[in-house]
Amino acid sequence: MAMHSNSVDSGTNIPEYEYPDVNTNIFHIGSFRNEWLKRLDRSNYAYEKKSEDTFDANFAKEMGMSADTLADLKSICSVGSLRCHPDDQQPDTNVVPSDPTLRTLIQRKKRQDFRAASKVNKNRHDLYADELERLTGGIKPKAAIDMVPEGDVILTINVYYPANVEKFTCVRPHVTLLMTGSHTLAELRDGICCVSDLQVCGEFSSTPDVAPEFISKDHFKSAYFFFEGVFYNDMRYPECRDISRTVIEWQKAYNVPLYSQAKMEDTRFVDLKVKVGFPYLYCHQGDCEHLVIITDVRLTHANDCLDKKLYPMLVHKHRVPTQKCAVCHIYIGRWLTTNDQFAPSNPCLFCDKCFRMLHYDTKGNKIGHFMAFPYVDRGAFN
Amino acid sequence: MEFCVEEVKSDCVELLSRFQTSDSVRFQTFSKIWREMNFSEIFYGTVNHGEQRAFCRLILDTTSSFFMPPYSFQIRVGGLYLLYSLYHSQTSSPPEQIRLALKDWKDVKKFEKDAVDAQHHDVVYILRKLMFQKAFVFAAMPVALSFKKKRKLQRSVPCEQFMERPSRPQELINIDLLEELSNVEEIYGKLKTSVSSALEQSESSLNLVCKSLAPQLRSTVVDFYQWQQRRGVPRTDDGGGEGTSSQQECSNRAQLLASIKSKAFGEATEAPKSRRHRQVEVDSTGNSAGPSSSSGYSRAKKMSLKARTYQNIYVSGDSWNESPETTCIHRLSALDFGPEEKKKMYNKFHW
């Protein structure tokens, strides 16, 4: 198993567009970080903010300015000079001002008028998204050892839902996770929630109470990431198998240049050589494949969440509509029945309560003919 | 946020063109224009936090492009002032940062150096102030990339009127170079005469050098410069036409490609010999006068499969009326009495 070489020359570690506005060329994340750190002062990326007076004094000294000139300059360039309304008449920022001249505002006003005219229900998913944002911004850890160090990198990774949806839509449903450079790929894997991990295999009509003990996540622990010709396999548990081996053997049979392999738990993000904006692969459960795109790599900032333990951090999630029970239409379906003499359709979804009420008598014995399978809805993680 | 990209760009361009006509690089001038346009209101009226953040991100990214080459120094100063103003007027909290890509760092540094050399104190102050306030975030690329490949190649055309006049010929062929060239020519001429005799001089095979290179170069460059000046004046007539001619060529070519592709997909593909017996019969006795017939004009969009099926399949009147909607499983056994529920129509706003 050949390990990919880490030798890089600094000339190629400045990311450029490979295809304009689509993705970059390949670069090494650790070297990219070093390139930035070489160019910046410590004060540029430190979390602590120094006093403004020190800044002004240093500036005046460097430019050879008198105190009066500096004071003039400060007042001209102050944020106060940008205020469009007097202090005591600050308008409501939630409302578009009347008679707007800017094109953006004219467009927004049209929508505001439309919403005022028709009754628009508040979308509860927007509320969830707002809630999520509130929980993830600017948190500092209690222990210094958990602090993300200054000058570390943060990667924004989109993990797309598997493409086994019947309808093709223009929206690409995904989950966005933030990771730091010092985290390993295995930690990213642990942060990805996919419903296929919760699938339970088997027919349970005779033993409905035993079902929850057989989750796929516990049985099939193998997984890999595929970045730039290298398979990063999860080998943490003895049950994990190298599922990328099939691909490598196929390559050998067809005389195609070989991909190499590495361990997910030993590879940190700073060691990766990747392209930003380019799709890669995450495969688990043997055939559940997710597209993975690293959308952004940047240095940490004082406003980021600085607690290492909170990473991988979820910042965006696409919410999938859930399918409800066919009887009560209130609870999410938990059981799928086929060849069911009581059900109106084949297959049919039931919630736990309705399922038991319909198919089992008071003593818990099975009534009638049917096959029952535990069902995990795609929107289970909403 | 796709719906307001054009509007945001046009508002920024409007502000920057007013700044350009003011012919100044002072922040005072800029803030006056900002107040006149009530530009801080651009953040008002968003519906929720998510939209607010996305909008701040969009406008900061749009403005960052004006801070970079190939725009002229004055426009870049305007871009910097605009970034500063937007950063401090935004309504998101914590504030959205200004992204700086690694590849653009040296341009920023050069810009700062030019400003320091020209003693533009307000420019340098504002740039360093932004750095000090940690308004910048140091990233790999100017925007987040997620492999959005577009069907039509929408090349982001930079604003022509903000760009610096290309002056490479003048920079290259300057006075010093011309002087040196003529000196070298002279020395070469002297060497030639001293080495060869008068007889050989008249042989044309030795006349390899253009006789009056330096004056020719000079006159060419002067002509170019004068042509540029002339071109700059009637902007609305010639400048616009010439500036967009390359754009027109690009869009003509794109249209041609699109028309070829649409014709290729418009006809039903003939199945290979092995599958001929399974060829789909396209019933054209129905409304065949629709756009599916090749009418010569290039369609950008093909009709969806559902629409084409409805168009081509002839359904007898009775069965068409029987099932107007799909069966709802949860309503299989509904009470017969009671008022009919009207279907709720949700109006969606279209940008």
Image (spheres, coloured by chain):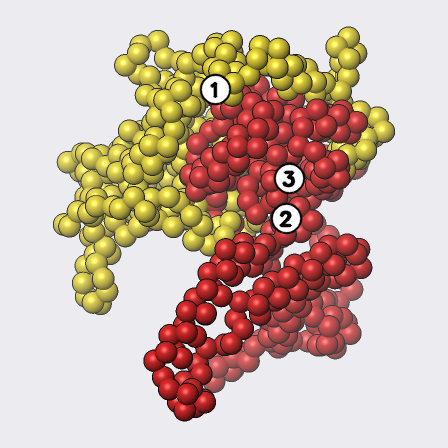
Chain colours: A yellow, B red
Residue B7 in the image: state x and y as whole percent: 71, 41
Q: CA distance from mark 3 to mark 1?
A: 26 Å
Horizontal side, residue A142 vs residue B158: left or right: left
Do marks 2 and 1 both belong to one polypeptide chain? no
Could you say which is closer to the camera, residue B199 or residue B82?
B199
On residue B163, which mark appears? 2
Residue B286: quadrant of the picture: bottom right
Decide: is A126 above or below A284: above
Pointer 3: what residue?
B75
Amino acid type of the residue that numbered disc 3 sits on in the rendered structure? Ile
Quick one: quadrant of the C terminus of chain B? Answer: top right
Horizontal side, residue A187 vs residue A355: left or right: left
Q: Residues within 10 Å of mark 3 (few under 14, many from 20)?
A: many
On residue B87, which mark appears? none
Could you say which is closer to the camera, residue A286 or residue A245?
A245
Residue A273: quadrant of the picture: top left
- In which chain is the residue bearing label 3? B
